[in-house]
Each structure stands twice: as structure tokens, then as C-alpha cells.
Image (tube, rainbow, N blue to C red):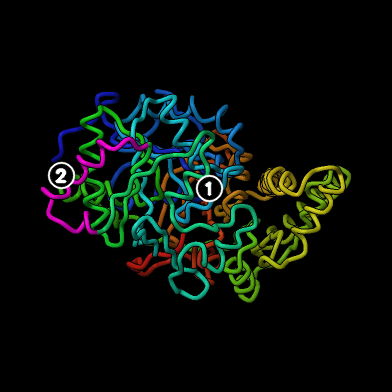
Amino acid sequence: MIAPANSKADTLRLAFYGDDFTGSTDALEVLAFAGLECALFLKPPTVAALQKFAHLDAIGIAGDSRGMSPQEMDAALPPLLQALSALAPIVHYKVCSTFDSSPAIGSIGRVIEIARQHLGAGMVPVVAGNPALGRYCLFGNLFARSGTDGKVYRIDRHPIMSVHPVTPMDEADLGVHLARQSSLAGLAVAKFTLPQLDQGRDAIDSAMATLLREPADALLFDASTPAHLTEIGRLIEREAQRRNGLFVVGSSGVQYALTQWWSEAGLPTRSPARFDSFGGVDRVLAVSGSASRLTAMQIEAAVAAGFVELPVSARHLVDDAFWPQARENLVARAADHLTHQRSVILHTARGPADPRIDEMLDALVAQGQTRSQARHEGGRLLGLRLGQVTKDILARVPLRRVVLSGGDTSSQVTQVLAPDALTIAARLAPGAPLCRLHSGTAELDGMEVALKGGQMGDVHFFDRARRGETRRYAATRGNV
């Protein structure tokens, strides 16, 4: 067993902040399925909050900085990251495995600057490769499997991420991508490449020592195999011990790296078999704000499986003149169907070409916003109002299970529901587990919720959430 690297808390080995809620549950899933005890909070937990759970190995905070401007990050992130740094020896800023971000929205480069300024983080490790999710980093360039055709693309040629409606990826070299997001003269990014990782451990350690002497702000690791991640986990653990604390940026590849290394080093864990199956329910409420092609296919499959489809006007939800009536109509219609034991799916788009999103943006631009402001503020407001609709529906018809689709949508809806914490209930789809809410509100406590990013799950995701899963979980992973 590894000697604990933690001089800050008695039991926690890792604390992470997820820049959206779907990514946060993905990180939580990896830890739980590796046999660790973990819980996800919406804000830094108090001692009393932690004491409500059994021995915890790791905790997370589910956030929404993926949709923040750099100025919003400057205000929101320092106290959160400092609170996590006081709890655990390794603090992980969890980003989407596609690294989609920009200098204006969800800037990962700005996060690195904040950590160096406020935490004294030094050179920040960056982990991008995650083969379990079909993500590969080769000489600093990111490649990702598409959920629509199963092929692997360089991220700037990915059929979905290269045309993301808010943060399209037009650069595959993550060193260049992160440097563009610097608020100053540009981040200096060193690279630990595949030839260096494919050596023996003595040579890997020597390469690491050499790179740490470089005048760089961040150290980007390649990874294309699980073995690469295990070595990265070993290096991260050792560096955390050497520095008495470490700040890391990356996808859930960080969780894979650490848990694989801890397993190899003999860290005792519980069996994850308890997550392998979950029962069906008579009805679910699904709420989708995702415009991805894959989500459109999933909506079509849900409707074919008997879900009642309730298209939502994104424009009416963000327009104060239309919002009250649109809210009441949606809540009444959804509650009526659910009361009659019908599953319901609310959605604001069926694919990237759906005109409802442009209608919302055009309306906000007509009110004086720029197109960029409309995407940023309109998307956030849309998520918050979908959250209020969801909360109203649950007040009328308490449910055992809810499914949320879309990274921003999941973040905003969950914040409106405001549970105290989430824990893993079962495997549902790779990167989108079924979670259990812990809340002082009776209709929410114990309710199960799945938070799905636009690229996660197969086409039958919504119906599987309703039907349950009795077979043993497949070893394949999807897209996050």
C-alpha cells in the first residue's frame, strides 16, 4: 500500500473540481468503479457535510466554469481551488476530454494561470489522453473518437467538436491551444511525449526530472494506452509527495491514471460489482438542451420507444415576455403525461441544424446583445429556466429517475435542484453513470439522476435509463 501523500487531511487522496456537471459525474464514476468511496458536492463541503458519509477516499465539486468568461473565473475559482487544496494532496481541475474551450469561454489556459497565481502551483501537469474514452494525445496533438460513426479524428477535424456551437476546436496541438488562452504573453507548455513514456521507469523518471527543470508553466503528457496512464499516475503521485501538494488539469484520464497506479501499488478498495445492475422504472423525465447529432439520434430512439416528445421553444424560455406562460404550459403538459405513467422528453433542439437555437440567438441579438453574448448568456439562462421547469414538474409529480442531457443544461438544472451531494448509484453508460441525490428536500432525496453530455451514450440511452440494466457492464467506454 502506498504511504499517504496527504498532510492536509486524514483520509482524502484526491479532490477535484469539474468544470461542468456531466464531466463531474464522469470523474466520480471512474473513482467509484475503481472501488473508491467518493461523493460529489455542489460547493466545498463542511466538516459536518463530510461526516454524513462513510470513509471517503475522494471528493468532487461539480461546477459550471466551462461556461464562464475569464473574468468570471477570476472571481469564482480561487476560493474553490484553495478550499480543495486544503482538503487533499492532489487537486484536479477536471475538463472535458475534448478540451473544447476558448480564450473567451471556459478558458483552460486561464485556469492554469489562476492556479499558479493563487495556489503557487508551479509547473502544472496536463493529462489529455484517455484511451478508455477513445481519446489519444500524440506529440501534444489530441485525437478523439466520434460517437456518431466510431471513427477517430484529429480534434480540429472531428465532425462534432470542430463545429461545436460555443467552443469549436480549430487547433489540435494542445500546447498551442492552451497558449492562446493565456491572458498575458502566452503559456509555456512543455511536452512529455510517447517516446519518453515508452521507456523503462528509470528513463521515464530521468525524462521527468529534465522536463521539470524547464522554464514552463505546464507539462502536457501524451497518452495512447492504459499503461501510459499508469505511469502518468505514478509520476503525479510522486510529484504530489515531493511538492506536498499538486494541482493537475485534465480529463477523467487523471482519475484513470491515479486509480490504475494506486491499484498496482496495492491500495485496498471495495468491489465495484454493486454498481453493475439497476432496475427499471415505470416512467422517467428526460430534459435535453444538447444540439449534438448524437443526442438527436437518442431523442429519435426515445420517441420510437414510447417517450412523449415535448419540443421546447428556446426563444420563449429566455424571453421574459413569453417565459411565464411557456413555463406553465410545459409543466402542465409534462406533469399530465407523467401522471398517466408516460415517460416524457423535453428538448430544445434535435441536432445542430435545428432552427430553434438560431431563433433564440436572433431574439437576443435583436434586444441588443452581440452574437457572442447571446450564445454565452442565452445558453446559461436557457439552462437555468429548464432547471426551473424541471423543479416545478417534480413538485407536481415526484419521480424516481430523471435524465439530463447536455453539459451546460445538466449543470444549470442540477444547480436549480440544489441537492446536497451526489453519489454513484449504478453504471448506465460510459461517462454518464446513474447517480443518487442526497437532499433535505423530500421529493429529491434518493432520486436517481443521469447527467449526459452531448457526446455520451449510445442511441438507446434514454430508454435504457427507463428500462434498467441487468447484464454485466460491458468493458467498452463511450465519449465524454
Q: Earlier in the sequence, mark 1 or mark 2?
A: 2
Q: Is residue 80 visible?
A: yes
Q: Which residue is mark 1?
A: 447
Say which amino acid is labelled 2: Ser
Say which amino acid is labelled 1: Met
Query: Horizontal placement of 466 versus 60: left or right?
Result: right
Tell me, yes or no, whether the highlighted magenta stretch contains residue 19.
no
- Total marks placed: 2
Tell me, yes or no, whether the highlighted magenta stretch contains residue 215.
yes
Q: Residue at position x 49%, y 65% from top?
A: 457
Query: Horizontal placement of 234 versus 173: left or right?
Result: left
Q: Write the start and end of the magenta stretch as one range.
A: 195-216
Q: Which residue is mark 2?
A: 206
Assign the magenta stretch its main secondary structure.
helix
Q: Residue at position x 26%, y 31% from top?
A: 11
Q: Secondary structure at mark 1?
A: loop
Query: Horizontal placement of 212 versus 29: left or right?
Result: left
Q: Are marks 1 and 2 in contact (CB under 8 Å)?
A: no
Residue count near mark 1 (Cα–Cα under 10 Å), binned few <14, some 14–19, many ≥20: some
- Image quadrant in which you'd find residue 135: bottom left
Q: Position of residue 451 (x, y in %)?
A: 53, 53
